[in-house]
Each structure stands twice: as structure tokens, then as C-alpha cells.
Amino acid sequence: MKVAIWGSGPIYEAALRACARQEIDVVVEVHDCDVLLLANYTRIVKAAEREIPRIGALCFHASPLPRHRGRDAVYWTVKMGDPTCGVSWFWIDAGIDTGEVAGTSEVARPPELRPRDLYETILVPLGEALLDTLLAQFKRGIVSRFPQDERFASYEPPRPKPAVAVET
């Protein structure tokens, strides 16, 4: 099995580790892959690019979809006081965070953690463990695709920009 990974940051590094543990070849060219992993990849992927990988393009999202669709899921999880937090790996489609879900993992949210700490200490390891499980399934020919339940969907806007003090 061959995987291409687009992205950056801690979840990108976690995806590389998961591929190494599962002994999956990481390739540079998307034309030569079974799965394209999007790990902290914020650009919209065109339909032509989504169709290239043999199995599909799988994206990390830092919330249990369909809750907190959008760019700043971790911020809104904390801001809204959610009692739980979680991650999803989903198959991208033409929508924003609307594709079928390959897997989701959810845990109690430690209320004292700020968004960055929640992401780095809870969500990235959770996403890595879930990806490990999914990659092992892919190697056995098991590819899960569960539709998102629109009754529970929410789309959150980008987080507000901090106010800038202006001296007069």
C-alpha cells in the first residue's frame, strides 16, 4: 500500500509515524498512491486531485464530525464548552468537511486546556491512534465510509481576530 501525505505540523508528523508503524510506503507523487492523507492541509482539493488516489483522499479534522465543521474546530470546542472533544478522519468530497467518515474517536475534554494545548496533548495523539487503526484496516482491504448525520451538523466560522489596541 502507498500513501501520499499533504500537510504540516504535529498531525502531519503523527501521520508519518503511523505510516511507519504500519510499514506503509509514503510516496511523493499522488499519482502513485492508494490513499492521499490530508493532515493539517487547509487548501480546497480540486475534484481532479480527489479522484487520483485509488482508494480516496482522507482528511484529518479536529472534532467528531459533523460537529464543528470548519477551520477552527478546536477553538469552538473550547469556546462552546463542549464536555467532549474528538477527531475524525473523513473522505473528502466537494463540500467543506462534509465527506463520509472513515473513523471518529471522542473523549472527555479536560476543561482546563486551552485550544493549542488540547490540540497538541489530546487531539493529535487521538488522531494518530485512529489513523493507525484505519491504516491497518486498509491493508486488510477494509475501507469504512459512514455518512455524516446532518441532524448533528454544525459549521463554525473562523475564530474572531483579536482586537488591536490603537494608540491615539
Image: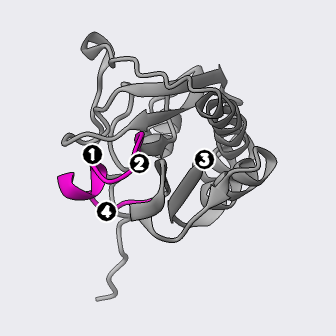
Which residues are the magenta region? 41-56
What residue sits right under mark 1 in the picture? Answer: 157
Label tally: 4
Task: Identify the residue at horizontal 32%, vertical 54% (top origin).
Answer: 52
Do callouts 2 and 1 mark residues in contact (Cβ within 8 Å)?
Answer: yes
N-terminal label among 1 and 4: 4
Which residue type carries mark 4? Arg
What residue sits right under mark 2 in the picture? Answer: 72
Q: Main secondary structure of the magenta part?
A: loop
Q: Secondary structure at mark 2?
A: loop
- Nearer to us: label 1 or label 4: 4
Q: Residue 155, located in which quarter of the rendered image?
A: top left
Query: In the drawing, what numbered circle is on residue 43?
Result: 4
The answer to whether residue 90 is visible is: yes
N-terminal label among 3 and 1: 3
Query: In the drawing, what numbered circle is on residue 9?
Result: none
Up the image or down, 13 lies above or below 59; here it is below
